[in-house]
Image (cartoon, rainbow, N blue to C red):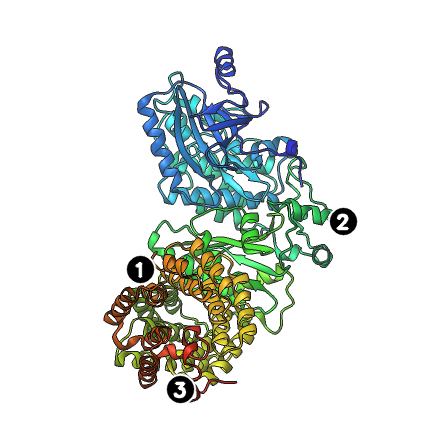
Amino acid sequence: MSTEKDRAPLSTEVSPQRHPADGSAQVQAAAAEERLTIGERLSARYRIERELGEGGMGVVYLVTDEQVVGETFAVKVLKEGLDPQALELLREEVRKTRKLTHPNIVDVHSVNVDGKKLYVLMEYLEGKSLNALLDEEFGRGMAFSHAWPIIEDVGAALGYAHDHNVIHSDLKPANIFLTTSGKTKLLDFGIARVSRGPLLHQRSGPLALTPAYASCEMLQGKEADARDDIYSFACVIYEMLCGKRPFGEVTALEAREAGARVPPIGVLTREQNAVLAQALAFDRKGRTTSVEELLVGLADKKPRARPIALLTGAIIAAMAALGVIFWALDKPWISRHSIVVQSVATEAQQAAARTAATPNGAAFNPPPHSIAVLPFVNMSGDASQQYFSDGLTEELLNSLSRINELQVAARTSSFSFQGEHPDIATVAHKLNVASVLEGSVRRSRHTIRVTAQLNNGVTGFNLWSQTYDRDLGDVLKLQTEIAAAVAGALKITLLGDVAERIELGGTRSPAAFDAYLRGSKAFSSTHGVSSLQSAITEYTEAIRLDPSYALAFAGRSLARSGYATEFATGPAIREFFDKAQADAREALKLAPELAEGHLALASYFNRGALDFTHANETYERAVVLAPGNAEVLADSGRFAVTMGRFDAGLAAGRRAVALDPLGPRSRYVLGQALYLARRDKEAVAAFGEVISLEPDNKGAYGLRGLAYYGLGDFQNARSSCETKPDYWASQWCLAVTNDKLGQHDDAEAMLKKLQAAYGDAAPVEYATIYAQWGDTAKALEWLTTAMRLRNQDLVYVKVDPLLDPLRKEPRFQAIERALKFPN
């Protein structure tokens, strides 16, 4: 890909041609003497590996963390003396910056002091600053179509910061970084802002910022606000497009005194030049008030950014044949010193690229038409809107999963990265996908902006991106537009009308869609009693607003079945199951090909009606309609195992895990299926993986204990179950394990705890305990009670290993016949 010497890591280097150094020769000499050397340590922890660059405020180094193997960071060591009062100010600025969790803002970890050295610990990136890129490649400026993606990314970061009341105060090309993975990152929030106070003994005022990009107000030492960042941003945009600063080498104050005007740029229309000139107004009152306003004005007549139309047939054919992304063709502006991607590559070069992208050196060969959809970032500045961005992500994920030719990573795995900012290669390797879709959502009162970007998982480079500005009422069309565009960019051969398939079971009511998203958010959370109740309430509201909303009926059906299984008691169990059936049938009446509707009906047949023949048919139909849906595969696979179809069921379960490698639920269901299939050793391993992903998963400890029990390893069985002793599955496990260990009194105590908590609601579990104790009469008595109550756990009777002592009993065989398990 690129050699070590070709890499230009996170740096605030200042090009002498662009930014003459501030300060006297004496200051520069002193700074040189204070430079850190390779091998030197900061705070006895961070080892200096090499110098990355130097800016007006400090020197940046690459360091390794000697306390955490493999961790590397960039540190910016400030050049001059430290005022104790300013240290707290700087730490406060960094605390504010850490809250800016945005893909286009560099992660800043902490401010630290080592003797007289003050340094900022931050994310280490590889790539080039915009400043270096302009120096090396574009003395005459970039084409608008090439500059626009960078402008959009910086604008998104800056707008997000302003929404959170954070001002950058030193926006310039040196603080804009383009990574080798194709992302634009904004650096150095807050450092210059604090430095204009008492941070440095020998500096104050304008010297602590970059005059060429500073507004009049900043040069006058006034408190900065968002409009000053907009002025600096406009200076950067101007320079990107024509290679020169708006007022040459003079400052804004000098230009204002001289009565200067902003020269128009030839690549922009008259309207666009007027928009840029307003952002460069000398007086705040006349300046553009928001980043969004500036971007909208500049985008008015721009060519579509990185359009799919540019994917000509020849490029697509080459892409499909070679298995490489055309990123270098789409972004010809990237420095030849950063990375070289040829339009035609040999098989050996492709293999080398795949191997280089794999941390352990093994070849990385994900399925070519596979994708993960990362949670879209909520940029609304309002945490209460998180459900909306999450919900839109889930709907887009579900839309893509309806394309049979596309393998889509499941929600739980994709959402495991929420709140993090992993690089694309990390996501691709962990989820085994060839492509990663990420984006952001900014929702205001009546409008919405959604930005989506598709990246290649092998190289990390961008394949396609687009920004959508819509009225809120048009949001319903967005998932179709984005999904179709992604499918086109991946060159999926679609069967039938993709738009019709994506919109299956949807609504045209924005209010109903909003309620549905809230219901889905509640349903996908902890599945506690309150979350299921909230989900049912929100789905009901969606149905009230749109009585033809099939997806809402399917969602409410699954929520009602879950409530009946987990929390309802007495007559309420039958009431919730009956309502779940009615909802599932209504969903299928409205949308007969809706996989979610078939899954909901199958769930009712399986647990609510104990109608295993119809459950089998309905699960199979759901799999045909959604072969890439991990939830459908996991549930249908577990059902197949309970019917004795071990090979088919375990294959479906493993397929679900492949689609959901970071999701504990898919592994939990697979572990349960392995245990029922008497693959106890594999079940122990599967539950161990669940626990590593979700250490507080109580059920995994109890069922792992039962798997150990199946292996005859009673000590490990008890140890596992005693980890979460108050959970029902652990008590069930301890009731049989303690008996085998000769501690029958303890075993009986566990059974009594279960019965006190669940009464007649767990008759099948009681039957298994008595069967293992050798009390056949009581075991059969509890199974008879389960039949009378039509208990949902009777689904396990055919294969549960704990019931094996009863299988030759005529009464047990009669119960099996009465349950009518399909052959």
Seen in the picture, residue 74 relative to 536 is either above or below; the reply is above
Residue pictured at 52% horizontal, 34% vertical: 262
Q: Is residue 569 visible?
A: yes
Q: Are marks 2 and 1 in contact (CB under 8 Å)?
A: no
Quarter-of-image position of residue 311: bottom right
Estimate the x, y position of residue 89 in percent, counting from the top left.
33, 29
Residue tagged 3 = 815
Earlier residue among tags 2 and 1: 2
State how far apart marks 3 and 2 are (Cα).
Answer: 65 Å
Earlier residue among tags 3 and 2: 2
Estimate the x, y position of residue 607 in percent, counting from the top left.
39, 78
488 and 215: which is toward the camera: 488
**Residue farthest to the front?**
742
16 and 434: which is toward the camera: 434
State how far apart marks 2 and 1 are (Cα).
Answer: 59 Å
Q: In the displayed structure, does residue 717 sit left or right of residue 238?
A: left
Seen in the picture, residue 609 relative to 517 is either above or below; the reply is below
Seen in the picture, residue 494 relative to 165 is either above or below; the reply is below
Earlier residue among tags 3 and 1: 1
State how far apart marks 3 and 1 are (Cα).
Answer: 32 Å
Estimate the x, y position of residue 419 in percent, counting from the top left.
42, 49
Residue flagged by tag 1: what amino acid is it?
Pro
The quarter of the image holding the N terminus is: top right
Residue tagged 2 = 346
Quarter-of-image position of residue 9: top right
Seen in the picture, residue 41 relative to 240 is either above or below; the reply is above
Q: In the displayed structure, does residue 510 sit left or right of residue 725?
A: right
Q: Nearer the viewer, mark 2 or mark 1?
A: 1
Residue tagged 1 = 725
Q: In the displayed structure, does residue 268 sit left or right of residue 95?
A: right
